[in-house]
Every structure is written in structure tokens, then in C-alpha cells.
Amino acid sequence: MNIKKGRISMVNGPVIKGTGMKGFQMREMVLAGPRRLIGEVVSIEGESATIQVYEESEGLKAGQDILSTGKPLSLKLGPGIIGNIFDGIQRPLKSIHEMSPGFLPAGIGLISLDEEREWETKLTVSEGQYLTQGQVFGEVQETASILHKLMVPPGIEGKVEYTAPDGSYNISQVLVRLRKPDGELHELKMVQEWPVRIPRPVKERQPLQKPLITGQRILDMFFPIAKGGTAAIPGGFGTGKTMLQHQLAKWSDADIIIYVGCGERGNEMTEVLEDFPKLIDPRTKRSLMERTVLIANTSNMPVAAREASIYTGITLAEYYRDMGYHVAIMADSTSRWAEALREISGRLEEMPAEEGYPAYLPSRLAGFYERAGAVETLSGQEGSITIIGAVSPPGGDFSEPVTQNTKRFVGAFLALDRSLAYARHFPAVSWLSSYTGYIDHLADWYSDNVAHDAFAIRTRMLKLLHEETKLMEIVKLVGEDVLPDDQRWILEVARLIKNGFMSQNAYHNEDAYVPLSKQYRMISIIDYLYHRGMQAVKKGIPVSVVRNGELFEKLFRMKYNIPNDRLELFDGLERDIDSFYDNLENKYSDDFEKVKQ
């Protein structure tokens, strides 16, 4: 094989320029310098090329070799991904730590999956069978929670001429040989490679019809995310973005979680790496890592690898989606990814756009979020990728370019409010700034699986909260006592919605995760209280009497006092409401009659 070779002519941090690069291709992976640092060609002009290096470029010199690999930056896809912790270009950090404790050495090469470990493999095809792209030809129990399906790579089909017997194999051994239509023989192994920047093909994209159930009341009932949809969680420092993503990773009903720590602080990622292996999956009662992949690219790691980490995460997600799994990818945070784009763009001397970001920032964000979706896979199964990206606007300014451009491409915008976070109200999702575009998509599912009036109650409750915001402006000026009783009642119920329903305790056994059935009963009982109370107020009963402290305390404490599997206890709450307001109306009705007489 004739290896193409160029020479380094300039080094500028993670960006190098090479000469004698004739024959090199755009997006081709190359090896630079004597340590064979991994890089990617990002522009070509004549025989000169610009390369971004995914490792520390210290020590590179002009005149050193640049070697071609003949392929784009690609991932190895096979058993051994789940439960692993990778850097931004799929190098396993545990293995690297064993080789070089304490730091990530440059020139370590593109190691990824363990090629020596053997997996118990069951082949599901036989000789003479014709296989098409995406078809499953074998199975490996990757973890106790995940059955890894070995698939024919996209673009490959043919007649089976050989199958290995069931047994233990490593990822490099040949399991099946196919005779392609052109007569060429193709070997199928456990592992396949795929370029990170190219979306994997599917048979058909499906409409979004099911929610990603998170167990978080403000999301599931007020701002639901569709399974296969996209969501952004913007918020300033300390508003709880990472904690909310941890909750979603632990409790959402996705089959597989891929958590990308992109440019976050080292101590924050350390917390993730230490905590996730200790978390227990509530569905299987086993370690959460048995269905989780972590990609850690901290702020002190090479900036070019940070840019690649997002694509690494989404490519892994697509691979497991193709097996028929529902995957949720948490990107924390896309702002740090955009900052990596800005730094590399500056070194490439590209014309900057708003706030120094490259002009192609919107298209890169769109390309990332568009790889979400619910699909029919090549093998005819249902699969989905839900993308939830955190955004860290400087100073909490939502008008900055990353937040504004992200807002254009996501279906749900879950804005975190600093004032709520500082008041210890978590999740600090603002009901005024947040929105979801999935209500119409999910209406039928909620009607069939939760209650026919679930979204109607949601609309009424959100209307009350918006009314309360307007009324609080008046209260700040002249005080609450000047308001008529019906408006004061709105304020009382809005406080109950915020503190009794929307606020959720991530450390409480009953409140950390709440099933949709209980969420509906909680919100419907608050709605019932509102209507019974408003009915009493309109009959002239003072709001100070209508608001019963004991009753409000029961409704506030119901999230803790009513177990998730004892929903019949809500019937008792409803009887308490009826009993109180029936007696109240009868008493005041008698009093009004006496006044008339």
C-alpha cells in the first residue's frame, strides 16, 4: 500500500498546515509528527492543507511528516461500548489510565474497543441465507440490561457462504462470510467502522407520537419531550443544568443513555464519573452503567477533540438506535462545543460572525439536532434518538448566539431561571420562558394512556401561572389586600402549583421519580380545589375563609405522603375538599339568609 505523505509547514495550537498534500482528501484522518498525532483535514488548497489535531500539539515542528490513513475520522462500533468511558474521539479513559496514570499522553494512537476480550456469541443466520444491510446476523449479551445485535453494515449485502459456530469470539474474528452480488467475498465481524460526521442511514423517519417519560412533573405534564425529539436546557451558572440532566439520565424511559461531557470543568466531570457507576437503574435494580456510555472531554483536554465529542456521541447513539433501542443523548454543554468551534475558526483565520462565532454555527447546530428522530431501521425495527442539550449562556444571557440559534432547531426549550434556583426551587424550569412544540404530537398518546383531559388541565394551570405573574406586578406596587377575592384566590392556587406540584425533591424516595398516573392525579386535584374554591368565592365567601390552611398543607404534602403506588388515597383528598367546601357553602348560605331576614 502506497502511503501518501506531506510535511508540516506551520503549527498554530491545534491547527497545523501541511505542504505536499496532493492526493489527501477533505475530512481525511491523518497522523502528524513523529508521535503520530491524530488529526483531520479541514481545508485543501492546491498542494497545501489545513489540519485540526485532536491531541496536544506541543513538540510538532515544521518539516515533520504528515501521513495519510485513507479514511475519515471513524468510530469502531461493536460490543464493549456500553459501560465504558471514552474521550472525545472514542479512546477508553480507563485503559489509558492504566497505561499512563494521571494524564492523557499525546501520541497514544486511536485505541478504542478491547480487541482481546472474548464475547459469548450466538449466530442467528445460516449458510445460503441472503442478508441485506442492517439485518441482524448475531447476538451478544453486552451487559445484563443490553442485548447487542450484530448487524450487516450499511451498503453491504450478499449470500451467506460461511457462519462460525456459536461460541466465544473477540471483535476481530470473522463470524460470517458473504458473497456479494458482484462476486466479492465480504467478512462480517462483531465490529464495524463508521465516519462520525455522516449520519447512519435508516429506512424511514417516523412521526413523533410517544413522550420521553422522565418522572419529572414539570416536564412530563407541562413541557413534555417527544421520544425522538430535541430539547435544550439553557441556564446560567448554578441553575441546575447538570443536575437536571443527571435526573433525566437516571429516570427517563430511554433504553440507553449517552452522556457527553463536552468542555465542562474537570471537577464536575469527575463527579459524573464517580457517581454514575454507583447509581442504581430503577428499572433493573442493577448499575445504571449497564445501559450508559460516558464521553468525557473536559475543558483542559485538546479543544479540537471537544469539537469531535458531540459527533462521537451521536454516532454511538445511531448505532444502538439501529438495533431497535430508544436512546437519549445528554450533551453538556453545547456552549462549550460552540466555543471550541470559535477557537478553531479563529486559528483558521475564518471571518467571524456574531460574538466571534463562525458563520457556520447555525448549520452545525442544525446538523447535530437533526440527527435525532424516531425511525424505522434498515432491519424494520422501531428506534429513536432523543437529544437533550444543555446551553451555558455567559451571564445567563439568552440573547447570545448559541442560545438563540439552538432555539431555532429544538422542539422543547426548558429555560432555567436563576431566581428559582436561588430560592431552592428545583427543577428551576421557568414556566414563563419555556415552551414545547410537542403538545399536538403527544395529545393522542396522553389522552389514551393518561387521561382525556390531561392537556386541558395543563392549559388551565399554565394560564393561572401567567395570571399570577401579571397580578404580582400589581401586588409589588400596592399590596395583595387591594385585589378582589377572585384574583387573590388565583395567587393562592398558583403558589400551590409552584410549590406543591412543580418543585420536586431529587433526594426523596417518593418524589425523585413520579409516574404519570400520579402526576395526573396531583394536578387534577389542584384543579378541583381551584374550581371548588372559585365557586365559593363567587358566592361571596371571603378568600381568607376559602383558603383552608390544613387543606392546602395536605395538598402540598401529597407528593411526599401519597406513595406512587397508592393512588386511591387521592380519593380521600377529594372527599376532604368536598366536605370542607360543602360545609362552608351551607354555613354561609344560612348566614346570608339570616342577613336577608
Image (cartoon, helix red, strand yellow):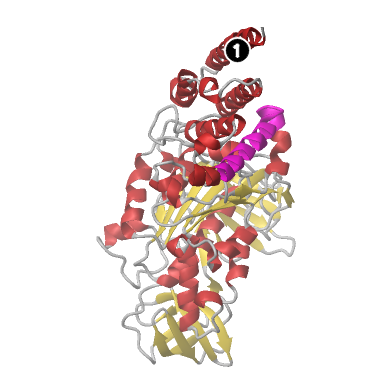
Asked if residue 415 can be seen in this view, the reply is yes
Q: Helix or strand or loop: what does disc 1 sit on?
A: helix
| Residue 212: image location, x then y, percent | 59, 41
At label 1, counting other C-alpha atoms closer than 10 Å, the crowd grade (few under 14, some 14-19, many 20 or more) is some
Q: Nearer the viewer, residue 353 or 485?
A: 485
| Residue 209: image location, x then y, percent | 70, 41
Q: Nearer the viewer, residue 367 or 425?
A: 425
Considering every residue shown, the one lying at the far left of the view is 101
Name the amino acid type tagged 1.
Answer: Tyr
Residue 330 sits inside the magenta stretch = no
Residue 470 sits inside the magenta stretch = yes
Q: Nearer the viewer, residue 282 or 592?
A: 592
In this figure, which residue is indicated by the disc labeled 1? 588
For the C terminus, which image quadrant? Answer: top right
| Residue 303: image location, x then y, percent | 41, 71
Residue lying at 38% horizontally and 38% vertically, measured from the top left: 279
Name the quadrant containing residue 269.
bottom left
Q: Nearer the viewer, residue 195 or 183?
A: 195
Q: Main secondary structure of the magenta part?
A: helix
Residue lying at 54% horizontally and 81% vertically, measured from the top left: 352
Side of 180 where 349 appears, left or right: left
Side of 292 where 597 appears, left or right: right
Q: Vertically, is 255 above or below 22?
A: above
The magenta segment is: 446-471
| Residue 16: image location, x then y, percent | 44, 84
Name the quadrant containing residue 362.
bottom right
